[in-house]
Image (cartoon, rainbow, N blue to C red):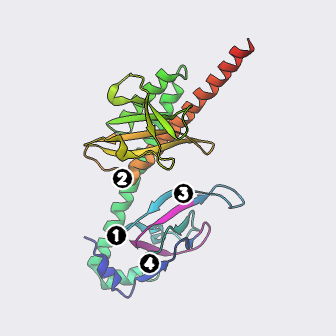
Amino acid sequence: MLDINKLKISWFFKEVVLEKWEVLFREWDFDENIYIVLAWELSVSKYTSKAKDEAKILAYLEKDDVFWEAALNSSNKKEVNIIANRKTVLLSINAKQWLIDFGKKYQEDASNLLKYIIHLSNKRLSEANYLITASYKISKEILELQEINNKNIFLLIEKIKEIIWVDHIMYYENNPVMENYITLKYDTRTKWKLLNEVKELTNNNLDLLDLKIDNYEIHSQKLSIWNNNLWFLVFLKKDYKFNESDKKVLVVAATSISWLIKQKQLLDEQRDKDYMNN
């Protein structure tokens, strides 16, 4: 079992402290260190424009995460940006210069470190496979829809519930009449029933405690199109805490449903225009 304290007191590992928003490295930087997060959190992002003025967050690194283990056998330029979300403490070791010497002096600890890196790598591969598989299945279901209407959206929600392994999904729409209110339109616990239960938002967010749902772990996800928060999905799962991998899949599900709901909205608006013109 990996003992972080033994690494900390080793001469071979160096402590790195980053202030909030401080950059550890950016894309195309060279860095041959392996890092272990001791406290707090970093974000992993990638530029989405050639001008490098926009970036998309891909993941977060938290306590006990190991990253840039690729330095063990590669000196390639970095492919992502690593930035501290708050004051963060890391351990680092140069994979080329010091890791071999550390292994010679502390064989058991070096072996445990490599085992831990392999464990994390396998876990990340498993999570990536889950995300890719879920994304493919959801996309396939959307492509097979014959028509975009409420019935098919609700059917898609039922199918997504099975794809992402949650017990239930609740779907809320912004209330078109009352500002800062949303309406529960569908709940898989009451299958195929069109609902109209109204809830008030708190600071433009859904208060999960106000839902008064017992015996379920709850996670909510805003559905947004073009920076407009239009709807909410609430995911329920019994006796299970949503981890970061689960939340990534929930974002994929929410994004897919957002697109579909927006298409329905545009179609409804066009149909109303055609009706008025005729």
**Residues rendered magenta in the picture:** 26-45
Residue 28 image position (x, y, % from top left): 62, 68
Of labels 1 and 2, earlier in sequence is: 1
- Name the residue at 48% across, 47% down: 205
Q: Disc 2 or 4, which lies upstream in sequence? A: 4
Q: State the CA–CA distance, disc 1 to disc 2.
A: 24 Å
Above or below, 264 relative to 250? above
Depth-wise, is mark 1 or mark 3 nearer the camera?
3
Asked if residue 27 lies in the magenta stretch, the reply is: yes
Mark 4 to mark 1: distance in Å?
14 Å
SS assignment at label 2: loop
Amino acid residing under circle 2: Asn
Is residue 109 highlighted in magenta? no
Looking at the image, is 186 positioned above or below residue 121? Answer: above
Q: Residue furthest right?
A: 277
Q: Nearer the viewer, residue 151 or 248?
A: 151
Q: Which residue is mark 4?
A: 92
Reading the image, the residue beneath label 2 is 243
Q: Earlier in the sequence, mark 1 or mark 3?
A: 3
Q: Which residue is mark 1?
A: 114
